[in-house]
Structure formats: C-alpha cells, structure tokens
Image (spheres, rainbow, N blue to C red):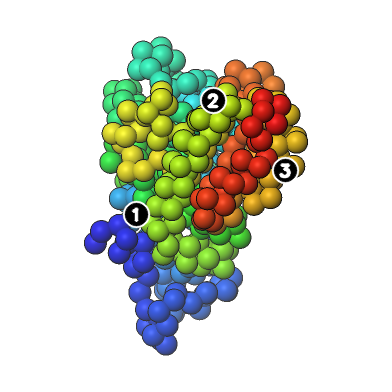
Amino acid sequence: MRFNTKSVHSGRKPDPVTGAISTPIYQTSTFLFEDFDKPRECDYSRTNNPNRLALGRAIADLEGGHQGFIFASGMAAVTTAIHLLKAGDHVISCDDLYGGSHRLFSEIITKFGIEFTFLRLDEEQKLRDAIKPNTKMIWIETPSNPLLNITDLEMVSRVASEHEILTVCDNTFSTPYFLRPIEYGIDLVLHSTTKYLNGHCDVIGGAIVTTTEKLSEEIQFLLNGMGTNASPFDSWLVLRGIKTLPVRMDRHAESSMKIARYLDEHPRVKEVFYPGLTSHPGHEIAKKQMDGYGGVVSFRIEGEVPEFLRKLEIFYLAESLGGADSLVEHAATMSHASMNEEARIKAGITDDLIRLSIGLEDVEDLIGDLEKALGRSKTG
Ligand SMILES: *Cc1c(COP(=O)(O)O)cnc(C)c1O
C-alpha cells in the first residue's frame, strides 16, 4: 500500500461484530477473560486497549517501524522514552528542542542522575566530540522547534551506531508524510499526536514507534509500568485525524512556502526560518531527506511585537501547532518560557522571534492578515 492508502486503512478493519467501518470506541477499563489463565488480547486498558492498538498499528505502518505505542501526551511519550536510561547515563540532545522536553530533561530527569549535553547537531565533528563513554542516547528534532534547524539523520545514526548509542527522533513537525526517520537508521520515532497526526486542535496525545522486538518489549513494559497510556477516545480521535493527514500536510506545506516567501520580502521582517527557502542553512539536507517542508514558519520582526500580535485576526494567539486553525505565538514568552533565559538566548530564541503554524485557511486570507498586522513601515 502507498502512503495515502495506508493513512486511510492501516491499523483498522471493519468491526467483526457489527461491520462498522469506523473502529468502535472501547470505553472500558477491563475485559472478560476467556477462561481461567486465558486473558484475551486486551485484559486491562492501562496495559492495552483496542483503540490504542489500532492507532499504534497505523502510526507504526506509516513510519515503517516495528510497533507503535500510544501515550496520554507527547510529554508522556518523551518521559517514557527517557526511562529507557538509568542513572549515570549521558544524553546528547539538540539545543533548540521543544520547550517542554528541554524542561523535562534539564530540570526533572537530571534529578535522577542522567546528564544532558545540549548541542546544535549540524556538524559531524561537533557530535563526535560530545560523545562520552557513558553516552547512551541522542535526541533529535528535525526541523527543530521553533527555529526549524535541520539535522542530517543519516549522519547522526551512522555516528551513533559506531558507539552503540540509541537514536530518538521527535518527528512531530514533519510527520511520516514528509519524513520517515527509520529509513535513515533512527531507532525510535516519537510524536506529539496533539499536532499534525490528530490535526484538529482537540486532543492531547503522544506516540512512540520502535524498530526492534526488544525496544517494543521495553516500551510496552514502561508504558504499562508508568501508566503513561492514552484514553480510548483520544486514540480514536487521532486515528480519525490520520485519515486526512496527507491532504492536510500538502495544504500546510503549500501555504507555508507562499507565506515564507511573502515574509522574506517584507521590509519589517529581519529573518525568515523555513527549510523550504533555498536561503535556509538546512535546505539541502531537508531536500534530501524530506518529501515536504512542513507547516511551521518562524521569523524575526522589527519593531513592536505585542502590537503586531494584537492586530492579527485570523491567526489566533495560542501555543501549539498542526491544526486546521492558523496560530501565532511568541516563543520566548509562550512555548519556550519554560527554558531558562541563558539556554533560550543561546539557542537563538530571542524576543523578536515569532512562530506561525500555518493552518488550512485560504493562503490569500492569511497573507492579508499578516500584511494588515505588519504594516509597511519599520515600526508597523
Ligand atoms: C508539542 C510537542 C511536544 C509535547 O507534546 P504534548 O502533546 O504537548 O505533550 C513534544 N515535542 C514536540 C516537537 C512538540 O511540538
């Protein structure tokens, strides 16, 4: 099956009892045993539930992985993945990663004796130099959040495999429609399904796709042991969202390219970050490893930020991304406020940085909204 067909059919089959095409919602905590010592495929919904299983199969199929596991949030997935490690281990992570992941790593997980090095993963030698004898994991986001930096996945997984280091790629921004990290040798793929996979701003959820039987057993053990699982209804909603993933991603990317070009020429815009622009430092690698450049555009603005944000009408001032509704946010005080100031500035998340999540509205309306809010003079 090709990607569009998989998006509609993977993980699902009509309900054997009623013939319902849509997977029924199994809103139950527990399941009847067939007999003494004979549980069915699902016996307790923390451990397994048919809606989670269906969604896990669908996402694993789209990513080309071994098995998919479904979590209560993207952060629940991140938390679960990091528990593959133990005290004394060292992690190399990209430096401008999702603000919540940065907070979890630097302020919570370090309490348990795991060390982190935050690094821009743009040069092979820099990565090699950062590897220590106890380095056990490399954590990647590409494109990263909010600066859309691109990491060469083939390079990272080649270096990692020489040292038997586990590689994790948070693929939330690209989705498997545009990037399948496993094809480049990545071991674990992670998602906040809250974003594009669900796509409608109405679920918080997460997923992990594994590549081996061993990793699948470990992730299932952690999910069940830590209780980081998603609910049946949220799993059902995300499975529903995935049916339209390819058509949504095509529109997000097409409009984002137009908006990036528009911003690039605007006198009040100092710098535009979108991997589809040939001026973007990661453009060549993005072109090589991705099938599209995604739906997030960031830029630096000259003049008053609050006034610009207040003048927008179609773009809602809100955190998050990946939905039908276009959103705008100020990374320094919103999505990345959880990062300490030093790390934030070092990662390039300055006060003049705006991040747009380009939704599914008509692109002419979105550009009109930006034009009205930006004005044409340097001060707006
Ligand atoms: C949103 C996001 C997360 C966290 O996901 P939640 O569903 O909000 O817990 C992790 N990584 C990336 C890249 C994200 O955008």
Q: Residue at the spot x=67%, y=25% of the render?
A: 378
Q: Nearer the viewer, mark 1 or mark 2?
A: 2
Residue 95, relative to residue 46: is it above or below? above
The reply to whether residue 240 is visible in this rendering is yes
Which mark, by number, is residue 62? 1
Residue positioned most to the front: 376
Question: In the picture, which quadrant includes the N terminus?
Answer: bottom left
Q: Amino acid at mark 1?
A: Leu
Tag shown at residue 311? 3
Residue type pointed to by label 3 = Lys
Is residue 257 toward the left or the right of residue 27 in the image?
A: left
Looking at the image, tell me whether mark 3 or mark 2 is earlier in sequence order. Answer: 2
Per the model, the C-alpha gap separating discs 3 and 2 is: 21 Å
Pick out the residue farthest to the left: 1
Report the residue marked by disc 2: 271
Residue 34 x/y as whole percent = 43, 79
Q: In this rendering, is residue 135 above or below 333?
A: above
Q: Earlier in the sequence, mark 1 or mark 2?
A: 1
Name the quarter showing ligand 1: top right
Q: Nearer the viewer, mark 3 or mark 2?
A: 3
The front one of 67 and 249 is 249
Across and down, in percent, residue 38 comes to 42, 73
Q: Position of residue 154 (x, y in %)?
A: 30, 30
Residue at mark 3 to residue at mark 1: CA–CA distance: 39 Å
Between 32 and 210, the residue placed more toward the observer is 210
331 w.r.t. 271: above or below: below
- Ligand 1 under 8 Å from disc 2 Cβ: no
Q: Secondary structure at mark 2?
A: strand
Q: Position of residue 255 (x, y in %)?
A: 46, 47
Residue at 47% of width from left, 55% of height from top? 197
